[in-house]
Image (cartoon, rainbow, N blue to C red):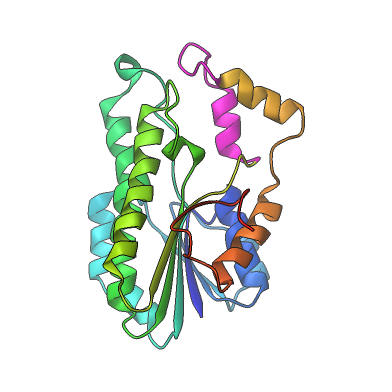
Amino acid sequence: MKAIVTGHTKGLGAALAANLLARGVPVLGLARTRAPQMAAAWPALLEEIELDLADGAALAAWIAGGALGDWLDGSGAVLLLNNAGVVSPVGPLDAQDPQAVLRAVALNVAAPIALSAAVVRASAGAQRRILHISSGAARNAYPGWSVYCATKAALDHHARAVALDGERGVRICSLAPGVIDTGMQAEIRATPAERFPLRQRFVDLKETGTLVDPEQCAEQLVDYLLGAGFGAEVIADLRTLS
C-alpha cells in the first residue's frame, strides 16, 4: 500500500501524512515546500515533490514525466488524499482578485481532479481509494465564500459522478472533516467582518476550544479511509460517520 497526500507540510495534510507514516504506509507528499522534521522521522517512507499544485502547467509536466507511475509501480493498493486547498479569495465579487480566483480553482478543483485521473491511470490492477477533503461549505452557501463554496461543491459532484462510473477497483469519497484548528482557521479569523460576515462564529469556536485537533481528526479520517466501509457514502461528514 502507498499513499499520496497533497499539502502534506502543514495543517491537516501534515497530520494525515504523519499518521499514515506512523502506520508504516509509504507517502508521496506533493506541496510547494518540504517537511524536514517529517522526512527526518521517516526517511525510508516519505518521498517529497516540491510542486505548486495551483500551477496547471507544472502539474501537467510532472504527471507527464512518469515519476508518478514509477513511484506507484508494484503497489497493490493506492490511497490518494486530495487535501491541499485555499479559502481565499474571501469577500463579494468586487473584492475578489481574478488572479486569486484562478489560483483557487486550479488548486481546489483542477489539481485534485487531474490527480485522481492520473493516479487511476498509473495504477492499473491496484485497489484505489480517493479521498477529497471537502467542507460543509460545499453543501451550504456562506456570504463571502463564493469561491470556496463553489470549489468544494465541485469536488462533491466529481465524487458523485466517479462513483456512478463504477470503475473496478476504485472507491471515492468527498468528506467534510469538521472545523479543525489549522492555519486556515487563523486566516479566516483574520478576515475583516465586512468581507466575511460569519467571521465571529469562527472566532467563538477558537475561544471556546471547540476546534478539532488536527492529529485527532487525522486518526479518525485515516481509520475511515482504511476501513471496509470507505466509499459506501460518497458524500460524507466525519462527524456523523458511524
Q: Quadrant of residue 49?
A: bottom left
Q: Position of residue 136 (x, y in %)?
A: 50, 39
Residue at (67, 61) in percent of width and height = 219
Residue 119: in sight, yes or no? yes
Q: Position of residue 121 (x, y in %)?
A: 27, 74
Viewer-proximal residue, 185 or 44? Answer: 185
Q: Quadrant of residue 224?
A: bottom right
Left or right for 209, reference 39: right
Residue 10: in sight, yes or no? no
Magenta highlight on residue 202: no
Viewer-proximal residue, 217 or 7? Answer: 217
Residue at (31, 41) in percent of width and height = 105
Q: Quadrant of residue 103?
A: top left
Is 179 drawn above or below residue 39 in the view shown? Answer: above
What segment is highlighted magenta in the picture? 181-198
Residue at (37, 42) in percent of width and height = 153
Label the magenta part by its dominant secondary structure: loop
